[in-house]
Image (tube, rainbow, N blue to C red):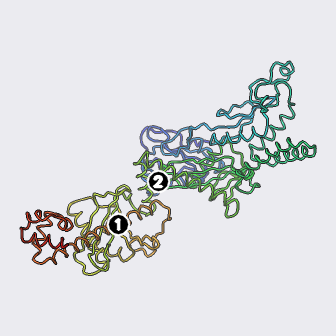
Amino acid sequence: MVNNQISSIFNVRMSNTALDIQLKTLPDSPGVYQYFDAEGTIIYVGKAKNLKKRVSSYFTKTHENGKTRVLVKRIANIKHIVVETETDALLLENNLIKKHKPRYNVLLKDDKTYPWICIKKERFPRVFPTRRVIKDGSDYFGPYTSMKTVKTLLGLINGLYKLRTCNYNLAQDKVSEGKYKVCLEYHLGNCKGACEGRETEANYHENIAAIREILKGNFKDSLGNFKLQMNQFAEDMEFEAAQRIKEKIEVLENYQAKSTIVNPKISNVDVFSIVSDAGHSYINFLQLSYGSIIRSHTLEIKKKLDESDKELLELAIIEIRARFNSNSKEIYVPFKVNIGEQLKVTVPQLGDKKHILDLSIRNAKYYRMERFKQVKITDPDRHANRIMAQMKQDLRLGQEPRHIECFDNSNIQGTNPVAACVVFKNGKPSKKDYRHFNIKTVVGPDDFASMEEVVFRRYKRLLEEEQPLPQLIIIDGGKGQLSSALKSLDLLGLRNKIAIIGIAKRLEELFYPDDPIPLYLDKKSETLKIIQQLRNEAHRFGIEHHRNKRSKQALNTEMETIPGIGEKTIVELLKKFKSAKRISNAKLDELEDVVGVSRAAKIYNYYHKE
């Protein structure tokens, strides 16, 4: 019943005092609450085990989610409906969301019309696919999420049983009067001619009963009947008929083997799982009958207010079971949910039940990955937003890391120490912002001191040039390199203004300042993959610079060994030819134009001794 204490909708935003009064009068009962804005529009519907505690939490907590903060600011009036149980609250919440479509609620909508298999209520029932469910007493099996599944089942049924496909009205009087004649399907052996009374109604309905069981996933009765028929034909020496029945048994057993994935004793069970990221959740639904999956569907939900997996799964279970008319008495879920005392909730830990739950989770993950690939192509901005939100959540950052910089040192046996800084923006490389560093103040192979130098030089320059700073710095190395980089941030006054982490190569450990315990991300997580891509790119970029520097030094050193050629001459030649290799390949007259006849001859003869 609706609580009449809070019934009017104000045309102006209520004062804090008015809200306080409303909050104080809320009951400690389960129910549904509705938030209205100043125009009297419902902007959010929620359920609660305790209305007073739940609704009050919106106004007493500091919300990290920006949308939640905006929602709270827009609340101008609160109404609530008290119900008997949490289950009633969940059902009512689902109905109100579907009716009012509040702006800040998750909407579980799906406009797709799913196919069904209909066994028509007729004297000789037809079996056919349809997308319209008519309440005329006919039996409807489904809905199926794929027409391919429907065609496979109908193909199996038509191969096992001879059913009519015509739409004649086969009433007893019309058949007796001889109103109809058998068609081509009869002569092809696909129908037994019920229209001319060549098949009894009882025999036809025996086949329909067997078909009903097959559509439920129960193959046992049909297999048993076919085996009895086969044996009887064999005893009567009718071997051709026995062979035809044997072929039907093989078809049915083959289909059963492909469709049964767990213990056939597991029947009339719904399986639900959920996989989430920062912005979306993906709920997979499997329905089992006699160990076979007879229905599968995955629902994508866009989060509105940072809803928990438990909240979303409960909402989805109610919606999906209603949408698919499921009457299963038991559900398998990854964690406990509250959706009613009449439904048995099982959280499998091992065995066949755990196997089917894992399969559901795998389906949800596959669907999620497919959606990622589609969105990456069709909506790159949404893809970038999702990645950034996920990285913020995974790395426990205060803001999305739209601008990331990664540093790596490179030296071989202490020679030519260099460093590289690579830049990613919105999760993608920004190569025009990459930078090389030649180590200037450090003598010998000292990675820690080198890291301290390049980090200081990089951000001192950005500050001087008033360039934007990154939201995240990644240091290729463990605690030592991270500590060195922090020293530079301290000197520049940037400590706690830029998030910084270190990544150790061996176990992909992520280290945070002043935290001795590293963070381990899932090896398949997108956040870790982007960090690895940054680290690998910094390593490649640094190695490339180091190799070029060593090569250039080796060539320059070789030129210095030519008798009569000094540093001044080498500089003049490099200005003209750009590299030592081009100098070695230059023609004599080209060299003479730059350094004169005498020196040109010495250089040319050195490179052309043969």
Q: Is residue 16 visible?
A: no
Q: Earlier in the sequence, mark 2 or mark 1?
A: 2
Q: How many marks?
A: 2
Q: Which residue is mark 2?
A: 59
- The answer to whether residue 285 is left or right of residue 55 is right
Q: Which residue is mark 1?
A: 540
Vertical side of 75 occupied by 387: above or below: below
Quarter of image, res 352: bottom right
Quarter of image, res 561: bottom left
Which of 301/356 is in front? 356
> Where residue 410 sits in the image (x, y, percent)?
32, 73
Q: State which quarter of the image contains the N terminus.
A: top right
View extreme (right): residue: 236
Give neighbour class at mark 2: few <14, some 14-19, many 20+ (Cα, 10 Å): some
> Where residue 334 sits in the image (x, y, percent)?
62, 58
Which of 130/41 is in front? 130
Q: State which quarter of the image contains the C terminus.
A: bottom left
- The answer to whether residue 229 is left or right of residue 481 is right
- The answer to whether residue 435 is left or right of residue 352 is left
